Amino acid sequence: MSGYDDARTAARALATEAVHAGRDDLARQGLHAPPIDLSTTYPSYDSRAEAARIDAFAATGAEPDGPPVYGRLGNPTVARFETALAKLEGTDAAVAFASGMAALSAVLLVRASMGLRHVVAVRPLYGCSDHLLTAGLLGSEVTWTDPAGIADALRPDTGLVMVETPANPTLAEVDLRAVAHACGSVPLLVDNTFATPVLQRPAEHGARLVLHSATKYLGGHGDVMAGVVACDEELAGRLRQVRFATGGVLHPLAGYLLLRGLATLPVRVRAASESAAELARRLSADPRVARVHYPGIGGAMVAFEVKGDPHEVIAGVRLVTPAVSLGSVDTLIQHPASISHRIVDADDRRGAGVSDRLLRMSVGLEDVDDLWADLDQALGGVSVRAAGRSADEGAAGRPEPAGAH
Ligand SMILES: Cc1ncc(COP(=O)(O)O)c(C=O)c1O
């Protein structure tokens, strides 16, 4: 290895990796921006060599050396994003998909193909993840439990334990080290969408699979839909094989946008988290707000229960965008019981702590005083109508650390 390569591969801080990982070869190629390879197929005059490459992929799922054979086997631009995300999460590999749900589906299919159809999961999860498991759409069977019940819920056919922390939408947190310990040899999947590797690297705590809806913070600008699983090379190989066979690939342009998004991820997450913490403080002190949820590890998401009608707040915002999703440069607010978690049975939803008065806000990069001014006027209507109401009010006056689960 040359001195040049030594310098390039030495351990580097997260902020440095965010800008450079997946791009280390560019300068040597005389490039600055990564090229976008839109090819769906890759010509070769040597079909014997192609046969050997396909056999190798079928055996291990390892990325073929050289160019891919066909776009569903891999894409060089997407591979740059995968390399970078694996670096940020501290895993061997990462495998990208067309959406977060495609990524979760691939994980379930990998485990089911090994005869391990049972999943142990902790609520709340993102509404559609909950739905995918509850409805058994991919033939899985789920046992819902709290973190303390994981060890007892495991069965010989349990293929996966799944948690989100901080969880969507209540921002409940789990102790990842304790959960990983309870899983024994069963792989733990942590949905790290809300924390991002800037705030939390679940693989360091024993998670074998780290999932992202890359649609959120990794992309960061609300203009790319994607999912990714960071994991060891063995599981990555199986995930690539499932992706090849089922087709949920990421488009190369999305791969390019995600790589660009990663470069600013630490800066965006830290700046938005500062504003979110300040808004959580102001909301906690506001008499129109019954309860504020803000994670102990920080982050750019805030959830709060209003004393009045949450639909009035959604109707009242002007600077904040009333929309589902999260992780964009602009602040979004939505009512989980109506949108992100609508598909979850109402009793299950409420049982998981998702109150009908809960609003979930993804704080962006606007000035915090402008955001507060908008929230203040949107909450204004609530306070008038809320007078005299007392339903499910919690303790106001302090942000609630999102608790053990
Ligand atoms: C925590 C979490 N996981 C997974 C998903 C699913 O991701 P996608 O919408 O990219 O399929 C979402 C989407 O909101 C989410 O919030």
Image (tube, rainbow, N blue to C red):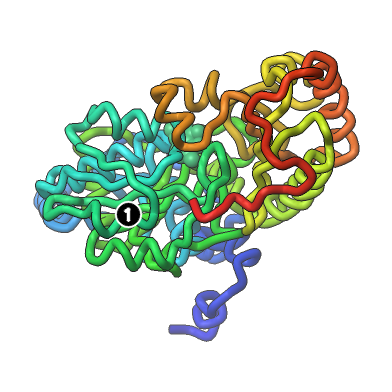
The quadrant in which residue 41 appears is top left
User: Does residue 254 sit above or below 23 in this rendering?
Assistant: above
In the image, residue 221 above or below residue 262: above
Indicate whether 276 appears above or below 59.
above
User: For the image shown, how many numbered marks are present on the structure?
Assistant: 1
Residue ID at (60%, 66%)? 14
**Which amino acid is tagged 1?**
Gly
Q: Give residue 149's quadrant in the image.
A: bottom left
Residue 256 x, y percent position in the rendering: 53, 43
Of the 4 image quadrants, the one containing the N terminus is bottom left
Residue positioned 32% across, 34% down in the render: 248
Q: Can residue 95 be seen in this view?
A: yes
Instruction: Tell me the residue that label 1 is attached to.
Output: 149
Q: From the viewer's perspective, is 302 left or right of 178?
A: right
Residue 43: x %, y % from top left: 26, 41
Circle 1 SS class: helix
Give the image quarter of residue 270: bottom right
| Residue in front for this viewpoint, 218 or 313 | 313
- The percent position of residue 319, horizontal first and vertical second, equals 81, 25
Q: Which of 394 and 188 is in front in this view?
A: 394
| Left or right of 283 in this view: 153 | left
- In the figure, is residue 386 to the left or right of 86? right
Residue at image position (42%, 25%) is 347
Q: Nearer the viewer, residue 366 or 346?
A: 346
- The 10 Å Cα crowd at callout 1, few under 14, some 14 to 19, many 20 or more, is some
x, y percentage for residue 57? Answer: 18, 53
Residue drawn at x 76%, y 27% as measured from the top left: 320
Is there any visible trace of residue 43 in the rendered image? no
Q: Which of 211 and 37 is in front in this view?
A: 211
Ligand 1 is within 8 Å of the C-beta of the residue at disc 1: no
